[in-house]
Amino acid sequence: MADENDIEILRHGEPQNDGGEDSGRLVKTKQRERHVRKSRKKRETIRTVSRFFITIALAAGLYFLAVCPQWYLNKNAFSYVNSNIIEVSNNKIVPSYKILAILKKNNVPDLPIYMMGVNELKTQIRQLGPVEKVYIRRYAFPARLQIIVKERMPVLTISPDLKSLPVAFFTDDGKLIGREYLPLSRDFSTILVLSYGNKGDDYTKWDKAKIR
């Protein structure tokens, strides 16, 4: 015969769990969720603070970059020859000192190099007889200028006789250039023309047809 305990089990089924194990798992789950939320909030705070300081650093960097003196030409840039600031290139007839002499007549603008106007400088340099075109490149950081000259091509040199040095030359576009730009570089191959400069042979009055 079954004893009273067996009868009790049969009557009520298996003993019920008191819920302690489930409660423990629930507590641990809630703790993990709180930990995840705290970690996430901490990371978001760190990112927010980091973005703030990065923004401040970038703004400060851009400001100091904008006012950096390297954007500006040296105040004495036009006063002396300095290949690190002013570079003259492609000139075989016009000496560099003549171009620099023109620059000295101008004031260095108190502006960043990228805002500096160069048209006036180009106009002044083009007034030199052998110069046909002028290109001026502006380089920043550090600020500097490169002056590239395109010169007219000499075709005729004029001399009073075979024993004398040339006194002038004509370019291919008919322009007469005086002795201040002589002697020419050996890079140029010209025709020597003897002209005594008298009334019947005054080379200063030659036109393009005569030169051809």
Image (spheres, helix red, strand yellow):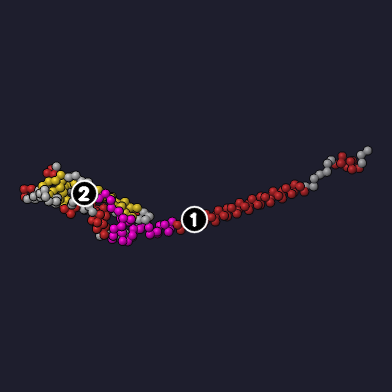
Q: Tell which of 38 and 148 is nearer to you.
A: 148
Question: Is the residue under label 2 in contact with that under label 1 (CB below 8 Å)?
Answer: no
Query: Looking at the image, can residue 179 be seen?
Result: yes
User: x, y percentage for residue 96?
Assistant: 25, 54
- The residue identified by callout 2 is 185
User: x, y percentage for residue 3?
Assistant: 92, 41
- On screen, residue 201 versus residue 175, left or right, reads left
Mark whose residue sits in front, 1 or 2: 2
Mark linked to residue 91: none
Inspect the magenta stretch and tell me whether residue 178 lies in it.
no
Q: Which residues are magenta?
A: 62-91
* Dot 1 amino acid type: Thr
**Which residue is at the far top?**
1
At 45% across and 57% down in the image, what residue appears?
A: 61
- The quadrant the C terminus occupies is top left
Mark 2 or mark 1, which is nearer the start of the sequence? 1
Residue 66 vs 211, above or below: the answer is below
* Dot 2 amino acid type: Ser
Residue 129 vs 5, above or below: the answer is below
At 13% across and 48% down in the image, what residue appears?
A: 158
- The residue identified by callout 1 is 55
Locate residue 76: give its quadrant.
Answer: bottom left
Question: Of helix, strand and loop, which one carries label 1?
Answer: helix
**Which residue is at the far right?**
1
Q: How many marks?
A: 2
